[in-house]
Image (cartoon, rainbow, N blue to C red):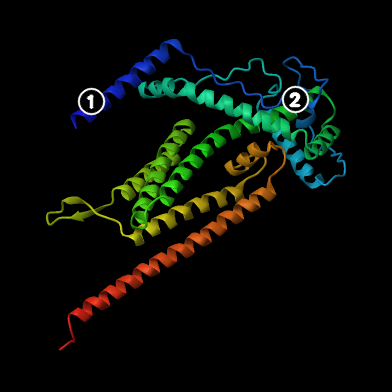
Amino acid sequence: MLLTKRKVAIVVIALTVLSALLAYFVKPHPPLLEMVSPQQELPDYKAHYPGDTSLANRLSKSYGLAMVLIQSPYTENNVIALEAIRSWGREQFQKEPDFLHPVSLEYPNPRRHSFIEAFFFNLFTSPRYFLEEQMGSLISWRIADFHNSSEYTSFRTSYFETFGVDSDSAALLARYQTDKGKMAVGVVLWSLMWLIAFIVGLVYLITSPAKARFERLQKVVAYLWLLLAPCYLARAYIENSVATLVSALVSAIIGLYLRFPFIIKIEDRGALRVYATTMNSKRVTFAAWMSYSLLAIQILTWLKTESLIDPDPISLLIAAVTGNFVHDPVAEEKIIGRIIAAGWVVISIWAASEINRDAKAAFEAEEKLASLKGPAT
């Protein structure tokens, strides 16, 4: 125990020293991610000076621009995409008329008003920015690859016919894809972390002996909930959201209960006592089924409430993989929704069979116990 405390103290001291050194010598800068450049959209692009609001005036003062569409297999998708860009551009120009030609490209870091915030800011911000920069480069490569497709060629032709072949239009299209790409950076990083966690958990379950299967399943489900808690906590810290903070607390309680099951009893004098207990296979099965059901509900809710202007994490993940940030991935979302629904049906059947088997085994055990007592007198 003394050795364990010493190791914890060494880790705390090392992290404190590292944070102090980073605070003095390193000033983290957010990566200036430019997923798409205007030159990619228009080779003859010429940068305008800040203050040029010609395209802003055209979008803000018009309630509808005539759409000139080149007939192609992607016409319907192009109509939706063009309307989304027009709505997005109008909204951005209303917030900041010169957002296409900003004076400064730097993104200011928010001030850290507590020593806890400052400690974690210096410790984790630089690695975070590094990962975001690498992921941004990967997404840029996927977008560039999509630009060579016939689907994007059809869209690009319709876009410039609608908004005009000029530098502002090229900058608007590049900025639209860049902003969507930035939104996908965090989604892909979180998805990779969860993918690794699921693979590790799956391998841990597959390699378990039959007698330890439910014990390992209990640990996997518990650790996934415990992993979800700091993820929610990070989101609450970034978004300053009380609801997300409550979700982090609930996830931590569920994870701790599944990992270290307990019961609370009220003693004679009203005192509360906490006792450690165990979970049988029926409860572990229910916990696994409930956890997957909540995951399925979350994903299906995302798929039903997404839009091109306000995309959900699943849409952003699909776009990052395909490089297509202009079209709505309807077909891919339907496939994912069907896979999630089919998985829920399979897990529900498995859970019902396991619970039924446990009930049958318990009934047979009671019958055997009754037979040992002999005939009733």
In the rendered image, the residue lying farthest to the bottom is: 377
Q: Quadrant of residue 269?
A: bottom left
Mark nearer the viewer, 1 or 2: 1
Q: Is residue 270 left or right of residue 89?
A: left
User: How many neighbours does mark 2 have within 10 angstroms: few (below 14), some (14-19), or many (20 or more)?
Assistant: many
Which image quarter holds the C terminus? Answer: bottom left
**Residue 28 in sight in this render:** yes
Which element carries disc 2, helix, strand or loop?
A: helix
Q: Residue at x 87, y 41 (%)?
A: 70
Q: In this rendering, is residue 190 above or below 169?
A: below
Identified at 55% across, 21% down, the residue is 30
Which residue corresponds to mark 1?
Answer: 6
Are the residues flagged by discs 1 and 2 in contact, CB closer than 8 Å? no
- Residue 122 position in % (x across, y down): 43, 19
Would you place residue 108 above or below residue 336 in this image?
above
Residue type, numbered disc 2: Ala
Residue at position x 83%, y 37% from top?
158
Q: Would you say residue 90 is visible in this rendering?
A: no
| Label ID, residue 171 | 2
Element assignment for label 1: helix
